[in-house]
């Protein structure tokens, strides 16, 4: 695998990364429901390339705690600034939407809320419990921020017993300062360790983007760190620059390279690995077999 720190950037997006524009009644019906319920999805806020696929099949990843993030990550299209106060009715509206959609596996994530003492952990707890009450058979995955590494915040989420606890590492340590200012590589690993320490039977998951300027050796080292932290499920996807103001794509990985990364991760010991150009944390998400 070539060293992707080469300063020459790719000229255009390869064919395997081209997706069709969203369409279909299911997609537009879900869009109307989200607006009518005053709910946000990471699919829209982060300009996810899979929105047509996921929404067309009636699935979505709910974005709680508003749609304004307190951090300014160099890869993310979510709005940055000063969020409004908490919407205490949001958990019940998310649960109602999950019920109306009739989905079997609900994914809940959030913007980072460093303005809140618990980082928004209680909102995750209340949302999980609301979905459980409304849809007892629905499995629930949470994709949480780092909560500044606070054990009590992680415990608040774990206490609600999600089926999958996900926290994305996103990139390699060398690139953290530029890609994830305000975050810390060791803290992200600690979040996963704490979750496993609190509930060793819970499924833990993480994800990383490639094409930001990392090397193969750095990726392998991150895989090993995540595995040592107790993580057993991994997603690996291609970084796509959402706007010209954000970090450029340094190179595109081929489908074969993604297959090789999957083989490497499985050899390290991950039991469930999704690796591909359009893979994202919640793309085709479900409770993986153990």
Image (cartoon, grey):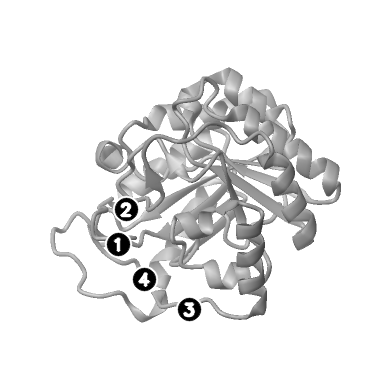
**Residue 260 left/right relative to 203:** left
Q: Mark 4 points at which residue?
A: 254
Q: In which quarter of the image is the N terminus?
A: bottom left
- Examine the image and state in which quarter residue 243 appears: bottom left
- Examine the image and state in which quarter residue 196 appears: top right
Q: Are marks 1 and 2 in contact (CB under 8 Å)?
A: yes
For marks 1 and 2 on the same chain, the one whose residue lies earlier in the sequence: 1
- Examine the image and state in which quarter residue 18 appears: bottom left
Residue 261, position in %: x, y? Answer: 44, 58
Q: What element carries label 3?
A: loop
Q: Is residue 288 above or below residue 132?
A: below
Q: Which of 126 and 181 is in front in this view?
A: 126
Q: Is residue 125 above or below residue 117?
A: below
User: Which marked residue is nearer to the observer: mark 3 or mark 4?
Assistant: 3
Residue sitting at x 38%, y 41%: 221
Residue 78, position in %: x, y? Answer: 41, 50
Q: Real-space Cα distance between discs 2 and 4?
A: 14 Å
For marks 4 and 1 on the same chain, the one whose residue lies earlier in the sequence: 1
Q: Is mark 1 on a helix, strand or loop?
A: loop
- Direction front: furthest residue: 36
Disc marking residue 21: 3
For marks 2 and 3 on the same chain, the one whose residue lies earlier in the sequence: 3
Q: Is mark 4 on a helix, strand or loop?
A: loop
């Amino acid at each position: 695998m070539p060293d992707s720190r080469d300063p020459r950037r790719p000229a255009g997006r390869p064919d395997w990364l081209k997706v069709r524009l969203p369409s279909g009644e299911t997609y537009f019906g879900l869009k109307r429901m989200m607006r009518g319920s005053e709910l946000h999805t990471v699919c829209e806020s982060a300009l996810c390339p899979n929105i047509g696929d996921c929404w067309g099949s009636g699935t979505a990843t709910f974005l709680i705690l508003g749609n304004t993030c307190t951090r300014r990550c160099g890869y993310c299209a979510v709005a940055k600034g000063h969020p409004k106060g908490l919407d205490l009715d949001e958990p019940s509206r998310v649960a109602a939407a999950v019920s109306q959609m009739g989905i079997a596996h609900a994914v809940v994530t959030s913007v980072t809320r460093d303005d809140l003492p618990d980082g928004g952990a209680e909102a995750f707890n209340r949302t999980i419990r609301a979905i459980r009450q409304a849809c007892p058979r629905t499995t629930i995955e949470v994709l949480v921020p780092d909560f500044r590494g606070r054990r009590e915040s992680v415990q608040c989420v774990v206490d609600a017993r999600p089926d999958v606890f996900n926290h994305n590492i996103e990139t390699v340590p060398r690139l953290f300062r530029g890609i994830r200012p305000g975050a810390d590589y060791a803290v992200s690993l600690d979040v996963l360790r704490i979750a496993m320490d609190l509930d060793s039977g819970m499924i833990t998951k993480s994800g990383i983007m490639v094409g930001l300027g990392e090397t193969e050796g750095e990726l392998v080292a991150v895989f090993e760190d995540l595995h040592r932290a107790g993580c057993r499920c991994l997603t690996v996807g291609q970084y796509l620059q959402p706007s010209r103001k954000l970090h450029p794509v340094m190179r595109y990985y081929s489908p074969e390279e993604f297959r090789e990364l999957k083989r490497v991760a499985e050899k390290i010991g991950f039991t469930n690995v999704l690796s591909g150009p359009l893979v994202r944390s919640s793309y085709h998400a479900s409770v993986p077999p153990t």
